[in-house]
């Protein structure tokens, strides 16, 4: 799998105490924990991890899972603890992050398992029934006696009936659920075909007739279960990877007790009134009021503002924002009903309701397919009765029609394409999280982008460096080096490794700037007030500024902007070339958004948009009949991500946004977006081709069935060849590049 | 054809054994980590069974 998102310019948050994530085994005797070890990638890593941790005293078992990149360890709590295990893993070069499925929302693997069990049963039964069926078919043209044939049919019934009853349960459940709500999906005709075929075959066995169709029903189930299982597994893999991304952020809060001791606690145990300490570089764990300290807080993940906000005692801070310069003490407050975050939560819940109206392509096809097939079958019965044949013959032929109308190929048409598409996208770093995400992406015609963190990397860069005298640059960089503020870091990065003048008595005033002494004169670097700039340099700059006050009192302004992603311009152009209308909706200030929109060639843009403004715009577009793809990363985008037709989110996004989005793309480039669009459109084409192939088979087979020429052999051959054809056609997705080249 | 009296139950029995074997592999978690299983054949000293 591709690497994680590009390293952020933000300092790494202090890790949670692993002890918080330790659980007890069911028998109670041992402690166990799960870690995410993202850097595991080969047999050598497996061996190193298992051997080194396994040799630690007290550890009873350690198992690394290379597919999910997780390690499960069990140990005797008296002899070892979680922190020592993490240290051990660090000493051999693996960063282990504790992972608690409960915190993230456990991935439900039971569907995959029950499908695999049904698949196994269907497979074994199908093989054995086919064994008997082929004997009968070859015997029918030579000299098999009716008695032997009857015996074989009874054996087939014995094997097939329990197997069908067990393996068809997923289809029955789904068909029942759809019918209960008055809807139709592909599982309804499939369940009907299987049930009728089995019943009729049983009746035929009892009267010792010539043909039975046990093998058709059980093989049908087998093929469909393969498609379904692979589909569920592909999605589970993507969701598990997405969970790992969230788990890597797992942090705890540092609680300050009444007596002043610091304690690590899990974030959900925070109550209003508690005091937490937020270190420089850590995220604020809960909404609150600053009780002590002065610092700058980066709110980009919440509001989209690319410039940090200065806070001091009494200021409100929000959960998820990043504390930059100095430690803060925060008193947790109850979530204010009118706060931005409450509004976000409310909007998300509202958006959830409107989501479920989308009808999948397969279900739309079923709406046409099922009635037409049933009408065909009914007409077959009528036809044969009219021609004077007996009731049994008429029913037999009608059921043959049902069996041969290839619910097999139709049932496979969508899952197989999805599996191939999801697999291809995961190799390119795009995680497909929702079952119908690809379909919805293929139908999108408008894209709404967020700016900070989505189109930009959230990293600041100096823009007017060329206009600065080298001496000023050197002095400024010398001061900037000691600070962790993003602007100072950007300045220091720009200057790089050069000999710099040494300043004495350098200190940082959080929220204001830096001050130092050069050859007896005070030099300051910071915001406008700090540097005492009085000149009306006041035209609103698109980014942020840092003012340098030289020893002689004159000032100079450094300008920074939030850099766009490397390939943002090409990506927007490529998306326009594919027929999308593009818009930019950001919570950032007007000059910044305007500059970004102009650089990218986006005509429609809006700045300072709060979450409800984003949703309002989406509703406007939806009312115009447009299908919107929303791309966003901040907390303020999460409701919009839910409300849009389909949504994308970078792997660096806020947790809530990642959970809300349909797709997650990793890496520092926007190229995966174009790739995903191309794959989804190709998938849709292939799905329709698969439907066409299935219909082509029907066009040949149905007349044969109506005329009574379809024997079980022909039904089996039709089913197998149609399934293979559909699968081979779906594999065509892997050929051809499609989209922006990935370097 | 009377041999079938022996062969049929034998075939069914073996088939059932196979099915039970598959269900056991499923239950013992052998399908949870297919990439890891592929990697482990390269290790000389791996003899651990996956924990429940």
Image (spheres, coloured by chain):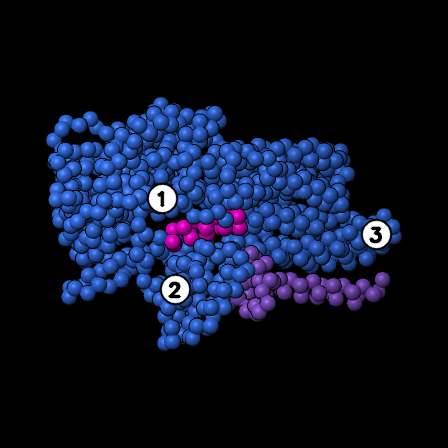
Element at badge 3? helix
Q: Position of residue A19 (x, y in %)?
A: 33, 65
Q: Position of residue A537 (x, y in %)?
A: 17, 27
Q: Are marks 3 and 1 on the same chain?
A: yes
Between disc 3 and disc 2, the foreground one is 2
Kindly report the secondary structure that dominates the magenta region of the rendered protein.
helix
Judge whether residue A662 can be spotted in this image.
Answer: no
Element at badge 2? helix
Label 2 vs label 1: CA separation? 26 Å
Name the residue that disc number 3 marks. Answer: A139
In the rendered image, the vertical position of residue A340 relative to residue A152, given as above or below: above
Label 3 vs label 2: CA separation? 67 Å
Callout 2: few (<14), some (14-19), or many (20+) C-alpha neighbours within 10 Å? some
Nearest the eye: A500 or A462: A500
Would you identify the image quadrant in which residue A34 lies? Answer: bottom left
Q: Position of residue A616 (x, y in %)?
A: 30, 31
Between disc 3 and disc 1, the foreground one is 1
Callout 1: few (<14), some (14-19), or many (20+) C-alpha neighbours within 10 Å? many
Q: How many marks?
A: 3
Which numbered marker is on residue A86? 2
Between disc 2 and disc 1, the foreground one is 2
Dot 3 falls on which chain? A
Q: In the figure, what tint was chain A given? A: blue
- Answer with mark 3 or mark 2, whichever residue precedes in sequence: 2
Q: Which residues are magenta?
A: A232-248
Judge whether residue A539 can be spotted in this image.
Answer: yes
Q: Position of residue A720 (x, y in %)?
A: 70, 44
Q: In the figure, what tint was chain B given? A: purple
Name the residue that disc number 1 marks. Answer: A653
């Amino acid at each position: 799998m591709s690497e994680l998102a590009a390293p952020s310019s933000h300092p790494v948050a202090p890790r949670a105490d692993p002890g918080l994530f330790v659980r007890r085994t069911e028998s109670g005797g041992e402690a166990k924990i799960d870690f995410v070890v993202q850097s595991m990638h080969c047999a050598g890593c497996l061996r190193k991890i298992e051997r080194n941790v396994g040799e630690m005293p007290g550890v009873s078992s350690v198992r690394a899972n290379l597919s999910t990149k997780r390690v499960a360890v069990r140990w005797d709590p008296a002899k070892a603890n979680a922190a020592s295990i993490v240290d051990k893993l660090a000493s051999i070069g693996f960063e282990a992050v504790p992972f608690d499925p409960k915190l993230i929302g456990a991935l439900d693997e039971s569907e995959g398992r029950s499908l695999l069990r049904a698949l196994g049963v269907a497979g074994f039964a199908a093989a054995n029934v086919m064994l008997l069926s082929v004997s009968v078919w070859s015997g029918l043209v030579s000299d098999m006696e009716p008695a032997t044939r009857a015996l074989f049919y009874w054996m087939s019934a014995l094997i097939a009936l329990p197997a069908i009853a067990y393996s068809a349960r997923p289809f029955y459940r789904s068909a029942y659920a759809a019918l209960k709500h008055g809807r139709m999906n592909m599982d309804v005709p499939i369940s009907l075909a299987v049930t009728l075929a089995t019943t009729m075959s049983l009746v035929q066995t009892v009267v010792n007739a010539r043909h039975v169709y046990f093998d058709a029903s059980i093989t049908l189930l087998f093929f469909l279960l393969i498609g379904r299982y692979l589909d569920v597994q592909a999605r589970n893999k993507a969701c598990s990877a997405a969970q790992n991304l969230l788990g890597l952020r797992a942090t705890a809060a540092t609680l300050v007790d009444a007596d002043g001791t610091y304690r690590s606690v899990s974030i959900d145990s925070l109550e209003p009134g508690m005091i937490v300490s937020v270190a420089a570089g850590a995220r604020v764990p809960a909404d609150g009021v600053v009780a002590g300290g002065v610092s700058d807080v980066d709110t980009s993940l919440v509001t989209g503002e690319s410039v940090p906000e200065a806070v001091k005692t009494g200021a409100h801070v929000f959960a998820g924002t990043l504390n930059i310069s100095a430690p803060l003490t925060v008193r947790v407050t109850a979530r204010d009903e009118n706060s931005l975050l409450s509004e976000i939560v409310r909007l998300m819940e509202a958006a959830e309701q409107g989501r479920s109206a989308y009808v999948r392509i397969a279900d739309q096809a079923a709406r046409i397919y099922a009635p037409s097939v049933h009408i065909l079958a009914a007409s077959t019965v009528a036809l044969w009765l009219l021609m004077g044949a007996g009731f049994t013959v008429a029913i037999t032929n009608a059921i043959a029609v049902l069996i041969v109308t290839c619910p097999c190929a139709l049932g496979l048409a969508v899952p197989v394409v999805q599996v191939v598409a999801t697999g291809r996208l995961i190799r390119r770093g795009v995680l497909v999280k929702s079952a119908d995400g690809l379909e919805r992406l293929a139908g999108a015609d408008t894209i709404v982008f967020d700016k900070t963190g989505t189109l930009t990397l959230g990293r600041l860069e100096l823009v007017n460096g060329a206009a600065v005298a080298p001496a000023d640059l050197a002095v400024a960089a010398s001061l900037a080096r000691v600070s962790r503020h993003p602007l100072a870091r950007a300045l220091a990065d720009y200057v790089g490794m050069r000999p710099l003048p040494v300043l004495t008595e350098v200190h940082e005033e959080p929220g204001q700037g830096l001050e130092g002494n050069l050859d007896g004169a005070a030099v300051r670097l910071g915001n406008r007030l700090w540097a005492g700039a009085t000149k009306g340099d006041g035209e609103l700059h698109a980014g942020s500024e840092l003012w340098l006050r030289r020893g002689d009192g004159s000032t100079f302004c450094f300008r920074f902007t939030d850099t766009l992603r490397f390939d943002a311009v090409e990506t927007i152009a490529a998306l326009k070339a594919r027929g999308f209308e593009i818009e930019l909706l950001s919570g950032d200030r007007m000059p910044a958004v305007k500059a970004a929109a102009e650089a990218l060639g986006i005509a429609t843009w809006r700045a300072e948009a709060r979450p409800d403004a984003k949703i309002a715009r989406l509703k406007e577009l939806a009312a115009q009949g447009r299908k919107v793809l929303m791309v966003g990363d901040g907390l303020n985008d999460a409701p919009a991500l839910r409300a849009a037709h389909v949504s994308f989110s970078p792997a660096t996004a806020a947790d809530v946004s990642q959970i809300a989005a349909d797709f997650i793309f990793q890496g520092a480039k926007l190229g995966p977006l174009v790739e995903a669009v191309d794959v989804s459109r190709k998938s849709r084409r292939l799905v329709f081709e698969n439907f066409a192939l299935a219909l082509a088979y029907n066009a040949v087979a149905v007349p044969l069935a109506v005329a009574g020429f379809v024997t079980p052999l022909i039904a089996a051959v039709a089913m197998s060849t149609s399934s293979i054809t559909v699968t081979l056609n779906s594999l065509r997705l892997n050929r051809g590049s499609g989209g922006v080249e990935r370097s | 054809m009377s041999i079938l009296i022996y062969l049929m139950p034998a075939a069914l029995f073996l088939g059932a054994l196979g099915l039970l074997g598959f269900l056991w592999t499923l239950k013992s978690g052998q399908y949870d980590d297919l990439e890891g299983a592929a990697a482990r054949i390269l290790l000389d000293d791996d003899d651990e069974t996956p924990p429940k």
